[in-house]
Amino acid sequence: MNKAIATTQWFIYGRKHFRKGGYERHAKKYKSPVQSRADIGRDVEGSDGVDLRGKVIVITGANSGLGKEMTTYAAAKGANVYMICRSKERAEEARDEIIKLTSNDNVKIVLADVSEYSQVTAAAKTLQAAEPKIDCLVCNAGALLNEKRLTAEGNESTIASHLIGGSYLLSQLLLPQLEATSTSTDDAQTTPPQPSRVIFTTSGGMYLTKFPSWPIATSTSTTDAYDGVMAYSYAKRGQVILAEESARLHPKVRWMTGHPGWSITAAVEDAFGDQKKYLEPMRSPWEGAEGLTWLMGTKEDIGGGGSSTENGALYLDREVQVKHMAGPFFSEGKFTKNSEGEVKEFMENLRRASGLA
């Protein structure tokens, strides 16, 4: 019964807010400029006014979909961008296209499958050798699978890519570079340093569930059949919890989850097929990514004591969102909430599974 309520309310809320029409309504209420596509540069007509020159931005899953839109945006704004991608061929094709669009040659590739923990560790070492600080890490890579798939290391691919390797392990390994940003000064030496940011690209699917027991979440339970949609939802709920806990444990860095709404991507096509008609009209990749790029580039009013973003929060279209809506009339309810003990166990399991324990 609780699951049915959560699913129904997610679908009703999603049809209002997550589709193309939801984005268009939300964007009309923005208090700062918004641009119509990712490749609009600085100080030109149609720009949102963001300048990322001197910033180091790392984006996983950067060669397609939302990741490519975010990479294009960061490059157009003058950032030094690192694309973490699995496929050398697809990464190079995307990089060359982005450089041509943005006239920014500072777009580099780091090859890694973030579901493979050894490759995540190698990628982190490459980045650490290249950059003393990182201003923004966007953990975007992952997939929604219809059938269970194991990594070369023997882990279930969905939770390994979205959560354990692609979000937790990578951000923990890069924490020294992320925290270094908060103690540096900008080029002008006139303003306090902007805090670095970690953005986990989550999904509305996390509204369907709380984070379950570790065997269920990692698809190692001997009694529960594999469900690709739920495996994805568990990983996405896990990212929301991870952002909350990381904000508490590592407050020098801003940790946020960003939800792109129902956007047209190859992953959605592969996972939903004809069923995606129930999500239409869907957002374009840029409409899904735009709110995430705002999290990447918006400035914090450090000197004035204010803040543009809320540490540990969930965002959709530049606005903080509720994290639960499983109770009567879209109230929070209890069905999708984890207890303090469950959250503590979750963090301990992440540390052990990633090899950091």
Image: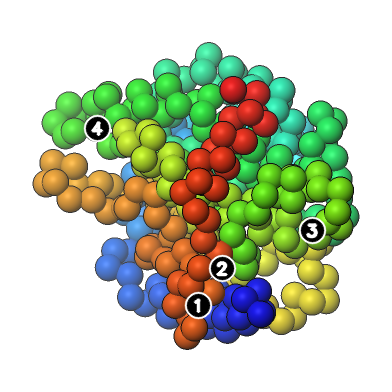
- Tags 3 and 2 touching, CB below 8 Å: no
**In the image, what residue type sits under mark 4?**
Pro
Which of discs 4 and 3 lies nearer the camera? The answer is 3
Element class at badge 4: loop
Which of discs 4 and 1 lies nearer the camera? The answer is 1
Pointer 4 residue: 193
Describe residue 223's horizontal placement relative to residue 42 as left or right: right
The answer to which of 281 and 174 lies nearer the viewer is 174
Residue in the picture at 70% in, 56% down: 232
Pointer 2 residue: 335
Q: Is residue 103 visible?
A: no
Pointer 1 residue: 327
Q: Position of residue 1 (x, y in %)?
A: 66, 80
**In the image, what residue type sits under mark 2?**
Phe
Element class at badge 3: helix
Which of discs 2 and 4 lies nearer the camera? The answer is 2
Pointer 3 residue: 228
Describe residue 275's horizontal placement relative to residue 62 as left or right: right
Quadrant in which residue 265 is drawn: bottom right
Q: Spatial distance from mark 4 to mark 1, Cα to Cα?
A: 41 Å
Say which label, 4 or 3, has the lower sequence index: 4
Single out the residue that lies furthest toward the front: 341
Q: Position of residue 138 (x, y in %)?
A: 52, 42
Say which label, 2 or 1, has the lower sequence index: 1
Single out the residue that lies furthest toward the left: 304
**In the image, what residue type sits under mark 3?**
Gly
- Tags 2 and 1 touching, CB below 8 Å: yes
